[in-house]
Image (cartoon, rainbow, N blue to C red):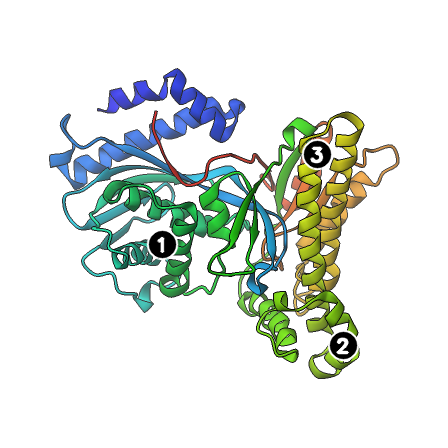
Amino acid sequence: MQERLYHRLDSPQAASLLASLYGQGALESSRYRYKSLITGLCALVSQEVPEQAGEKASPFRFFTAPGRTELGGNHTDHNHGKILAASIQLDVVALVLPRADKQVLFRSTGYPDVRIDLSDLSPRSSEQGSTEALLRGVAGELAAQGLPLGGFTAYADSTVFAGSGLSSSAAIEVLFGTIFDHLYGEGNRSALELAKIGQKAENIYFGKPSGLMDQTACAYGGGVLIDFEHEQDPQVQPIHLDMESLGLCLCVVHTRGNHADLTPEYAAIPQEMQAVARFFGKSVLRELTGETLLAHTEAIRKTLGDRPFLRALHFFEENRRVEAMQEVLERAKTRSGTARSAALMRYLRLVNESGDSSWKLLQNLYVPHNPRDQGLPLALALTRSFFETPGKTKFWACRVHGGGFAGTIQAYIPLEYLDAYKTLMESVFGPGALTPLKIRSRGAVELVF
């Protein structure tokens, strides 16, 4: 079986599929990565379930789920706003073998083994914050929906590095849902259904009160506009975004800031926005208008203070910005030459405006009580300084990426400046700080070579 799988990965069909996921330049490294999973799972199965290791065993099956990048809509989803996001080439990929029992063994390169018994799917407080919690939570939600679950053994590898704002947890959640659905269901659950299952696992089992944006973007694939006006039934619309054909590299810069004890900072953003909504007798800001907010500036300041007002103002401006970004991308898709360049310039200006709004209004670039750690503003300032040198192109943009306070910025860098920009960022934040991103068209799926 091992040799047959190796041979399939060397086929033209596999080459085409891997290139579509990771790019032509990453074809050989992708093959090596997938072959390493074959070697690892064969060794694991021979130790764990030797009766399934022979030539007549059930076929090994590949599954993948991508990380995601947020393109616009910073901190708007929790108040039923709009988001632009896209799945990326960084992913979790797993080679899986079904089991005859109710055990799941999930081994991922560089991480401790995850093992659960599917006969007990109740939440465990001792597992909160762990991969076991996500696996048990996804299985528990699928079982509650009537899916007859069985076990599996999996060998996995993830390139979605934690703490990057690229949604490593959401990727693993929708991966687990996809594996169970394909092994023991009909494999026809929608991307949105898988996203909701992952969110519940994260909320109830993992103990993190996250929204639905991360899981939705990971599950769908490609670029998407997600409208959360109706939170449990968001509207998802594909968008077209091909930065490479426009001569730009979309990337993130990891500033390696300290994420410890930031939960209160993250939680304060939706709390303060919703406090403004309650001032008007509403539950979320989407039920209001920006004009209503501005008409009551003085009263809100007196009752709630300045920061909740500024964060609410960010929400309304950012929501309108997402709509404008979508419109510009649609225009760029159908135009060429000067008209396309003009549309691209408008899109990049909107990205920079989003970054400014997060910095000045949302105020999620650093924690005031930790003034020594301001990696995000530093990275943005260095990026702007790099491109504002006379004679350099105006085709660039940068903004905070993800939740903020620490972590990563996102930047659109012209390809001719990428090496110099990478050298600058890594001289400040360390080797490997810059990661190029490629938007991939496929979300959480089973791969058939």
- In terms of secondary structure, where does tag 3 sit? helix
Look at the picture and state if 10 lies above or below 177: above
Q: Residue furthest right?
A: 390
Pointer 2: what residue? 296
| Inter-mark Cα distance, 2 to 3 | 38 Å
Marks 2,3: beta carbons within 8 A: no
Pointer 3: what residue? 332
Q: Nearer the viewer, mark 1 or mark 3?
A: 3
Look at the picture and state if 346 lies above or below 77: above
The x, y position of residue 396, in whole percent, is 75, 38
The x, y position of residue 22, in whole percent, is 49, 30
Q: Quadrant of residue 53?
A: top left
Front residue of 281/250: it is: 281
Pointer 1: what residue? 131
Q: Residue furthest bottom?
A: 303
| Inter-mark Cα distance, 1 to 2 | 45 Å
Residue at (70%, 36%) from the top-left corner?
Answer: 331
The residue type indicated by label 3 comes to Ala
Q: Nearer the viewer, mark 1 or mark 2?
A: 2
The residue type indicated by label 1 comes to Thr
Residue at (47%, 45%) from the top-left corner?
Answer: 218
Of labels 1 and 3, earlier in sequence is: 1
Callout 1 environment at 10 Å: few (<14), some (14 to 19), or many (20+)? many
Say left or right for 395 vs 409. right
The residue type indicated by label 2 comes to His
- In terms of secondary structure, where does tag 1 sit? helix
Say left or right for 118 vs 155. left
| Residue 384 appearing in the image | yes
Residue at (62%, 57%) from the top-left corner?
Answer: 404
Residue at (42%, 57%) from the top-left corner?
Answer: 199
